[in-house]
Image (cartoon, coloured by chain):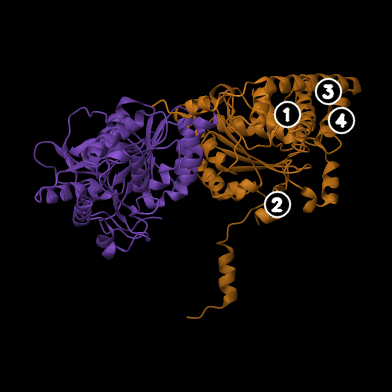
Amino acid sequence: MQATWRPRGAVAEPRVAERSEVVMVQAINRALAQALAADERVVVMGQDIGKLGGVFRATDGLQARFGAQRVFDTPLAESGIVGTAFGMALTGLKPVAEIQFMGFIYKGADQLIAQAAQIRARTWGKAHAPMVVRTAYGGGVRTPEHHSDSLEALLLSSPGVKVVVPSTALDAAGLLLSAVDDPDPVVMMEPIRLYRAARDELPTELARVPLGQASVRRTGDDVTLLAWGAMVPVALEAAADVAAEGISAEVIDLRSLAPIDWRILDASVDKTGRLVVVHEAPRTGGAGAELVASLVEHCFYALRSPPLRVAGDDVVYPPQLLEDVYLPSAARVAAAVRQALQD
Amino acid sequence: MAVAASSIEQALAASIPSLAQQPRPFRVLDPRGDVCGPEPELTSDDVRRLYRWMLFGRLLDERGLQLQRQGRVGVWGPMIGQEAAQTGLGLALEPGDWVFPSYREAITLLMHGLQLSDMLGYYRGLYWLADPNRTGVFPMQIVIGDQTLHAVGAGIGFALQRQPHVGVAVVGDGATSQGDFLEALNFAGVYNAQSLIFVQNNQWAISVPRHRQSASETLAQKALGQGITGLLVDGNDALAVYAASHWALERARSGCGPVLIEALTYRIGAHTTADDPRRYQPPEEIEAWRQLDPLPRLRGYLEHRNVWDEDAERIASAEILAEIDAAIRDAEALAEPSYASYVEATRSGG
């Protein structure tokens, strides 16, 4: 399970931009530090997260600052990581566990989905598991096999687990802080592609981003573009491209896939009457299927053309040199927008 | 550079780990109830309590089977033959210890403070009613072996927060084949978890016999590969199970290391009321184990000490049956909750 691959630029400290801009992985680091400092029940655990600081350096320096009792490496076993984090959470700790790559999460999925996510229901609300699973997901950075999966659909039909996906550095920090506060399991899917591409200026005291709230990244009247994680910049690029043709696209960053912010989504589709959903995961049974189905139910009479999905094909994630064909691009999204406008 | 195979083999011998000794089961009472090992420090009252709980388990099992046949509970997993393993552990637990059980140690859970009416409510078809934070008893685990990791996680949590409690997993022999079981032993060793992993080896996982679960000579020795202490105990000897569990719990509680206990016992009854053991369980094997029934063994010990007799047995049985029937009435009086209240209870507070 150990990756021999190292993310580009991971070893050298990332370039600190002018002002106090930081990249997403640094924002995550800052949020973890703030959570560890604020609440002694918070512990950070996972493979290589101690001295190394994580393969992406998300936990860089945290063990040195907070000690090995609160920031510790685990044996190399995903089910063990999630299952023991769950047991720790029951005792009142708030574990933030890292699964190095989402493609490895299947091994911990039983403990996450069948155990931690179900304890509240199985005990009539009397026991609950305040825990966070952070995991790096998604393609576009030439990773080897099993390092590029987007497995949100696996989690969406698993009641009891919340799922958040940031697309900005600020949101990564804010969502993570809210996830730590949450009394139940939250999975934060961290887009590998944006770890060092998304950057924001961060305040000294990081603000929480409430779970379950989408964000309108670009307002528009003609079509609603839904995306999350690394597909948000792709959707924004497509929106900018079609704007030159006079098409006004509204881009919504879901941020939270469970629960979904239907209020913002419904309002947008009611306004535009057209819908395009973008995601990296395979089309069939993907999150886009649920979004389209529900929005058709909610907004049927407002729709002016068939909702469309721009998604991965129904194939195993392709090898590195073919991934750019597989992944939704701004051009593919723009083409879908034009199609939505034609109908 | 050809090297003779025999010399390689000779040299390799020094590089193969081996068990210096095969363990023999720890035992305090022989099958007749005569003392054959070091007796734990228990008062007569303690031992009477131990025996009364064994009797409770035997009688509860009979009532549970009746209730299932009458359609008053959905399914029942018989405990008959395993009462010593369950009560020995139950007596050794301290308040504040957390038990993550499977579904065949009802007596352990009742001894730890779970109300029988709440447990019967679960069997009636409700979810787990009693607050685990109050009772120290978590819901019975259905996904075999998963709870081993929870007990180890709790044991790590107790250690990190310097709380003198132990996370206890109770599993069967089948669970020891699960990856989660071995991951749990491994994590327990690395973190020195305040945990006890208690295996009731009743020789059968539904229809699959013990030797088909593992080529390992004992299940206790699985602890060695993960760097923790394993113990093999005669699971039909309640005093031995108590003494071993007490030792292991104190060891874990004081941060001296987690322990795996294998209690050797036998499932006299079916896996559950939905099972037909006649298809696979040899009658002569059942009969041989019936001769090792744990109840007469401890009763013999009590009678030798003149602290139990036929009258005591009769009185205790009548009391127990009255307690069980009262709990059945309480469980059947529990109002059926609405579906809406279930949905509300599952809703996260966050």
- How far apart marks 4 and 1 lie (CA) works out to 17 Å
* Mark 3 neighbour density, 10 Å: few (under 14) some (14–19) many (20 or more): some
Closest to the camera, between mark 2 and mark 3, is 3
Identify the disc placed on residue B40.
1
Shown colour of chain B: orange
Residue A114 shows up from this direction: yes
* x and y percentages locating residue A235 in the rendered image: 21, 48
Element under label 2?
Answer: helix
Q: Quadrant of residue A252?
A: top left
Closest to the camera, between mark 4 and mark 1, is 4
Which mark sits nearer the N-terminus, 3 or 4?
4
Closest to the camera, between mark 2 and mark 1, is 2
Residues under numbered marks 3 and 4 in contact, where contact means CB atoms less than 8 Å apart: no
The chain holding disc 3 is B
* x and y percentages locating residue B219 in the rendered image: 65, 48
Residue A50 shows up from this direction: no
Q: Residue at x 34, y 33 (%)?
A: A179
Q: Which residue is tagged 2?
A: B210
**Residue B291 relative to residue A259: left or right:** right
* Chain letter, purple in picture: A
The chain holding disc 4 is B
Closest to the camera, between mark 1 and mark 3, is 3
Q: Which residue is tagged 4?
A: B300
Which mark sits nearer the N-terminus, 2 or 4?
2
Q: Which residue is tagged 3?
A: B317
Residues under numbered marks 2 and 4 in contact, where contact means CB atoms less than 8 Å apart: no
**Residue A227 relative to residue B100: left or right:** left
Residues under numbered marks 2 and 3 in contact, where contact means CB atoms less than 8 Å apart: no
Asked if B287 appears above or below B111 in the picture, the reply is below
Judging depth in this view, the residue of B236 and B223 nearest the camera is: B236
